[in-house]
Each structure stands twice: as C-alpha cells, then as structure tokens.
Image: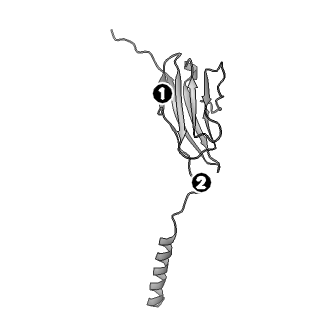
Amino acid sequence: MWPPNNLALSVALSVALTAALPPPRPATPALHPIIANGSSVAVPYMGEAFLFCWVAEPTRQVQWLDPSNAPLLAWRPTASRYHLGSGKHLPHAYLLFGDFRQEQEGVYTCVAQGGAGQEGRASVTLTLQRPSVPSP
C-alpha cells in the first residue's frame, strides 16, 4: 500500500501530465470533397450540365470518375462529357456535359487525393429529366 503522501503526489503528477499533453491527432487528415450541385441532378435530354467539386483542404489532385469508375478525360472538341480544372494542386474540378443523353446517366464521383496518401470522395447521381406530361 502507498503511504498517503506518495499517493497524493502520484495522483497530482498524473493529473498534471495528462492535462499538459495535447490531444492525439489523426495520422493523416481526411479530405472532404463537396459537390456544389448536390447529390442528385436531373438534366434535360440533349441539355448541358455543369458540375463543380471543390475541396477545402490542401490537395494534390482532384479527379472525376464516370459510373464505371474510369477517370474522365480532359476537354476535347468532340467530347460530349469532360472534366476541367483537375490539374495538380487545384482544389477543384469541373465536370461538363453537352448534349446529355440517357446512356450518360449514373453516379459520377469526385475524388480528391492529398500528398500524404489520403483520399476523399463525393458522388452525384445524374439522371435524364423526364418531360412532364400534361394532365387531361
């Protein structure tokens, strides 16, 4: 059994040391991409869509993936969908559609990659906007 003076000293040192230690930090901070358009967007047939993904934390790269998880290509004159702004060190990326069609429906994912190997993802579901049918 501890003598009363040693026990009090031990408790006081333990409390003082615990209070002086900073809280533990995660090994790598998480990335949190945000799609400004929300999680679901309806696009008119043969219409245009412009999606914006940004990341508040420092990033190495931001990339858009198609519904099959393949990276989308950068702009080309003949492309009906492409990404812009996802070069290295840019905290955002755009996904653009011209002439949206039913075969382009699906879940598109914005992926942010940080320098320490961390990764964050956000997804948006694109659907073809169905025409409204007037009631008789």
Farthest residue, direction left: 136
Mark 2, residues whose alpha carbon is within 10 Å: few (<14), some, or many (≥20)? few
Secondary structure beneath dot 2 equals: loop
Q: Position of residue 19 (x, y in %)?
A: 47, 71
Tell me which residue sits at (57%, 29%) in the image.
95
The picture places residue 119, in percent across and down from the top left corner, at 60, 45
Which label is found at residue 28? 2
78 or 124, nearer to the observer: 78
Query: Is 93 situated above or below 113?
Result: above
Percent across and percent down for residue 10 are: 49, 83
The residue lying at 48 percent from left, 34 percent from top is: 36
Amino acid type, mark 1: Val
What's the residue type where badge 2 is placed?
A: Thr
Name above or below for residue 92 compared with residue 41: below
**Which numbered marker is on residue 41?**
1
Q: Is residue 51 left or right of residue 117?
A: left
Give residue 73's quadrant in the image: top right
Left or right for 116, reference 57: right
Horizontal side of residue 30 vs 3, given as left or right: right
